[in-house]
Every structure is written in structure tokens, then in C-alpha cells.
Amino acid sequence: MKRLFFSIALLSILFFISSCDDDDVIDVQTIDLVILDENDESPNLVLADGFSIINLKATIPIDADDSITEVEFRKSNGEFLGVEGVTINRPLNDDNEAQIAVRVPNTVEQLFFNATISFGGSIYTSEADIDLRRAYADAIFLEPSTLQVTLSNAITLNVFLTRNIGEVSLETDASFEAFQVQNGSEISVGRFTGLSNAETDMNGQIIVSFITDTGNIDTELPITIRVTTMSNNNEMISESFNLAVND
């Protein structure tokens, strides 16, 4: 009977020790992923300017198993600073945090991110996303192929939308006008081609053509070509040049 009692007591002690060990193993499904700005705060507005930086921070509980040493980050677009590819592994620090900086693209879109850890043969993931807002121009630069044209001929107009910081977002549009001032009034003359694609490419460039083949052009007067677009201050900005017309 004493031997049976001792065996039961020993099994109870072993069960208690085993239970304590199990309590020390964290439920790693509580991994958390947040998006932060340069002030370690949640960003209110991020522009699609190909320049702005956001930080991804993944956190797991401080008492997680020591075998968890790193986090895998994945992005839908943008650039991990200094690293190519869509994924990167970053080590956990003493606070069980891992971070990576991401430069946003100049495309207006929703960016998706996730942070993943592996433990006990299972994979645990946390997700986060952010909407990028359009980055409009601060300035317009015009580069016509010529400043003189004869009637019924065309010129090529290269337009560059630029920003003081970063780049203008892809597919930012601009409007085009061509006119002569006759008797104090702006009279539309000529015509543009390529306006259906009059949006910026990845370099902020728009290319259109202007043709002097309408019948209302006065060769004694210059043609003013004006390009207008929205600025980041929600104001319209314009740039123009004069085109001389010869018979």
C-alpha cells in the first residue's frame, strides 16, 4: 500500500511539473503587426510619391519560446530599404520586436503586408494594410520639339510634372489648351492628339502632339499652349509657352 501511495504521489508531482512547462509556452497566435511613420505613430496620410518611408513593426509576447528568433515580412508592393524581393527576415530584439522600413511606390493603391513566424510545426501570420494617396505636382516643365511651326504641321510636346520631394504619382493627369488672343479674347485653335493617354508615366512625363490644321489660325499672332494640373495644395497650377506660326 505504501508503494502504491508513493507511485501516485510521484506521478502527481511529474504532472504538476509538466503543466508548469506547458504554461511557459506562449500562444504565438498573438503576433501583432502595425504600420508606423517616422515618429513611431500610426500615419494619417501617406503619399504615393516613391519617396515616403513607412515602418513595419511585428511584436510577439515577451515570454514567447526562445526558439522564435525572427519574423518574415512580406509586401504587396514598395521597396524594403536596401533589400530586393517581396520578403525579408528580420531578427527579434530583446523586446521581442522586429522592424523593417519600406519605401512606398508612386502608384496609388492599397498596400498589403504580413508578418509570419513558425513555431511547433505551425505558421502564424498577422496582416496590415494602408491606402496611398495621390501625390500631385509642385511644378510643370514644358519641352516642345520646336517654337516655330508652319500651318498643318505638328509639334511634339513633352510635359514633366515634378515635386519638391519625391515623385508625382503614376497616371496623374493634366489638361491642355491652345489659343490665340484675338480682340482681347482667347480663341481656341489647332488640336491635340494623344489626350486619351495624357497621364504621367513612372517618370512624371506626358507626351502629346499639337497640330496646326484648323482653319481659324491667324499667322500674324502667336499660339499660346497652356498645360494645367492639380497641385498638392488642391490648387490648379499652369505653365505655358508661345508658338510662332508661319504660312
Image (cartoon, grey):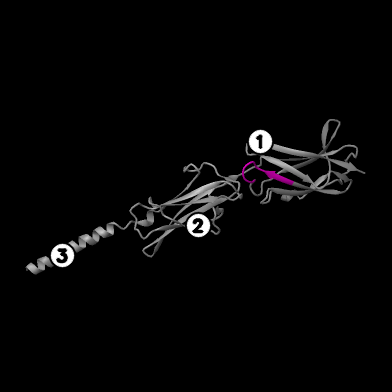
Helix, strand or loop for disc 2: strand
Q: Is residue 226 magenta?
A: no
Left or right relative to 64: residue 226:
right
- Image quadrant holding the C terminus, namely top right
Q: Position of residue 148 (x, y in %)?
A: 86, 44
Q: Which residue is mark 3?
A: 10
Other residues around mark 1 within 10 Å, as few (<14) / some (14–19) / many (≥20):
few
Disc marking residue 235:
1
Can you tell which of label 3 and label 1 is closer to the viewer? 3
Q: CA distance from mark 3 to mark 2?
A: 49 Å
Where 75 sits versus 177, above or below?
Answer: below
Amino acid at the residue labelled 3:
Leu
Disc marking residue 19:
none
Left or right relative to 82: residue 63:
left
Q: CA distance from mark 1 to mark 2?
A: 37 Å
Task: Identify the residue shown where x is 87% and y is 49%.
Answer: 153
> Which residues, given as a range, are shown in magenta?
159-167
Q: Which residue is mark 2?
A: 74
Which tag, 1 or 2, sits closer to the chain's start?
2
Which tag, 3 or 1, sits closer to the chain's start?
3
Q: Position of residue 90 (x, y in %)?
A: 46, 56
Q: CA distance from mark 3 to mark 1?
A: 81 Å
